Image: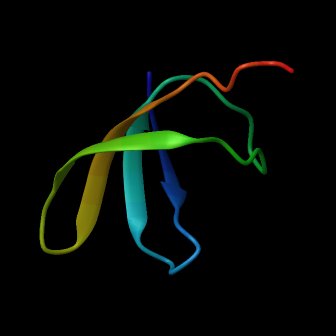
C-alpha cells in the first residue's frame, strides 16, 4: 500500500508501509523529484 504524508517542512512524501491518519512514522527517503519524495517506512526498535 502506498500512503502519502508530509515532512515537517511540508514536502509531500509517498511511501510504502502502513499507518493510520494522524500517525507519525519514520520513512527512509529512496528517491526524489522536484516536488515530492518517495520512500519506505522503517521500523523503529522498541526499547
Q: Residue at x 52, y 66 (%)?
A: 7
Query: As displayed, is residue 39 above or below residue 22?
Result: above
In x, y percent, where is residue 43?
Answer: 60, 22
In x, y percent, where is residue 3?
Answer: 48, 38
Q: Residue at x 40, y 55 (%)?
A: 13
Give the position of the C terminus as an image quadrant: top right
Give the position of the N terminus as an image quadrant: top left
46 with respect to 37 (left or right): right
Q: Residue at x 37, y 46 (%)?
A: 14
In front of the other: 35 or 44: 44
19 with respect to 33 (left or right): right
In x, y percent, where is residue 27?
Answer: 48, 41
Coloring applied to the structure: rainbow
Query: As displayed, is residue 45 above or below residue 29?
Result: above
Query: As displayed, is residue 37 above or below residue 7?
Result: above
Given the current orientation, which residue lies at the most extreme front position?
47
Given the current orientation, which residue lies at the most extreme bottom position?
9
Given the current orientation, which residue lies at the most extreme left position?
33
Q: How many marks?
A: 0
Q: Residue 46 appears in which quarter of the rendering?
A: top right
Query: As displayed, is residue 10 above or below residue 41?
Result: below
Amino acid at each position: 500500500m502506498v500512503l502519502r504524508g508530509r515532512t515537517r517542512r511540508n514536502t509531500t512524501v509517498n511511501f510504502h508501509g502502513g499507518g493510520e491518519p494522524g500517525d507519525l512514522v519514520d520513512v527512509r527517503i529512496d528517491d526524489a523529484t522536484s516536488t515530492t519524495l518517495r520512500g519506505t517506512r522503517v521500523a523503529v526498535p522498541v526499547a
